[in-house]
Image (tube, rainbow, N blue to C red):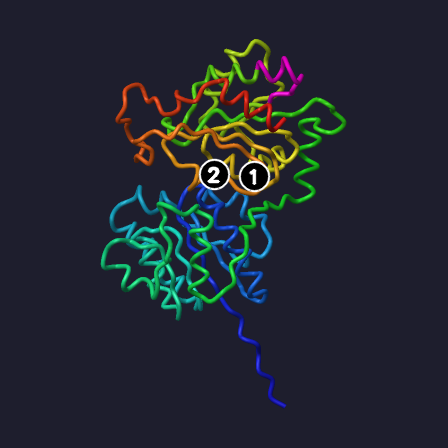
Amino acid sequence: MIRHERMVLKVLIIKLRYIGDTLTLLPVLRAIKQNKPEARVSLMIYKGTEGILAYQKGIAEIILLDRREMKQRSLFKRFSYDLKTLREVYKKKFDWVIDLTSSDRSGFISWATRSRLRIGAPLGNPLERFAYHRLIEADPQKTHILDYQLASLKEFGLAVQEPDTTIFIPEEITKKIDEQWILTNNSKPLVIIHPGARKPRRQWREEHFAQIADRLKAKYNARIFLIGGPGEESILDRVEGQMAQKPEAQTTSLPLIEVAALLNRAQLFIGNDTATGHIAAGVGTPHIILFGPTFPHLWAPKGAKGISIFKSPDCCGCRQASCLQKDNPCMDWIGVEDVWEAVGELL
């Protein structure tokens, strides 16, 4: 009797962006597994963005690309690194490739897989004709990032469900956070504030965060945790320095999965348009996200009750390298009362 081994569908999802952008591929992963439970789904992301994804179920493999290797070495070494990457993806024999990056580098990687069906975001140059068999048929200027990326699955004939942004947290991580920060058996509401952002143009004024923190303590007797990423210590120090009472905690050193566990214990998260807001939504925490240079209808977190505060400046959608207006007003147009009103709706 001859046995025929069942062919396993091998899928590669490419998302070479920052942490918040990378988290948005989770609904695509979940939708593929819902339609094709037997599929072996691999992710290709930048090294340093895997802190949440490494703990999520349904991922067969995470391929990490090192940005330093690609950008900081000699031309020969960069070429050697890129060539090694192209050889590796070719050897893996992927059946499907979904490139959600929209860059020439990811386009070349998609092409190098030589997979039988490759879908990608438009590149706007001739490379896209070789890199992909089809392009995502949705308008990225009008479609939320999650819905835009899920539209790629229609090209494979897969049913598209509502985005599943849930972030899984291992029990041992939750236990560690509870013990470290004494989060159990405390009746005071926990409010986590992240006043930083990857780009300064996205940051609300530090004194405004301090005023909101003071009000939360005065009205709700809230415990205030100030959090940030590496390099944001001075931002947290300045916010704390302007608070009438010190926060209960301040940290910039937690691994991303522990940030998720901490947010999962909070009654409210307040922050700028950053990855932290998407993590809060993914663990089901009510959130207030402040938008200025970016559109909330494209980037607002999904997955929990939240409020996006946005004053819709005419120049919204800028590249954020410099401001066209005097004194960077798009974040300043958001007032303390705007945020406080949102607090009242969620807390």
Q: Tag on residue 300? A: 2
Quadrant in the picture for the C terminus? top right
Q: Is the residue 98 above or below the residue 324 in the image?
A: below
Residue 235 x/y as whole percent = 46, 20
Quadrant in the picture for the N terminus = bottom right
Quarter of the rendering containing residue 89: bottom left
The residue beneath circle 1 is 281
* Three-letter code for the amino acid on which mark 2 is drawn: Ala
Tell me what residue is drawn at x 43 percent, y 40 percent: 297
- Residue 186 vs 164, above or below: the answer is above
Could you tell me how many numbered marks the image carries? 2
Q: Residue at 25% of width from left, 53% of height from top?
A: 124
- Between the C-alphas of marks 2 and 1, the distance is 10 Å
The prevailing secondary structure element of the residues shown in magenta is: helix
Instruction: Give the image location of residue 109, x and y in percent.
Output: 35, 58
Residue range corresponding to the magenta coloring: 214-224
The image's mark for residue 248 is none
Nearest the camera: 2 or 80? 2
Residue 70 position within the rendered picture, expressed as x and y whole percent measured from the top left: 33, 47
Q: Is 216 included in the stretch rendered in magenta?
A: yes
Lower sequence index among marks 2 and 1: 1
In the rendered structure, the answer to whether residue 140 lies left or right of residue 4 reads left
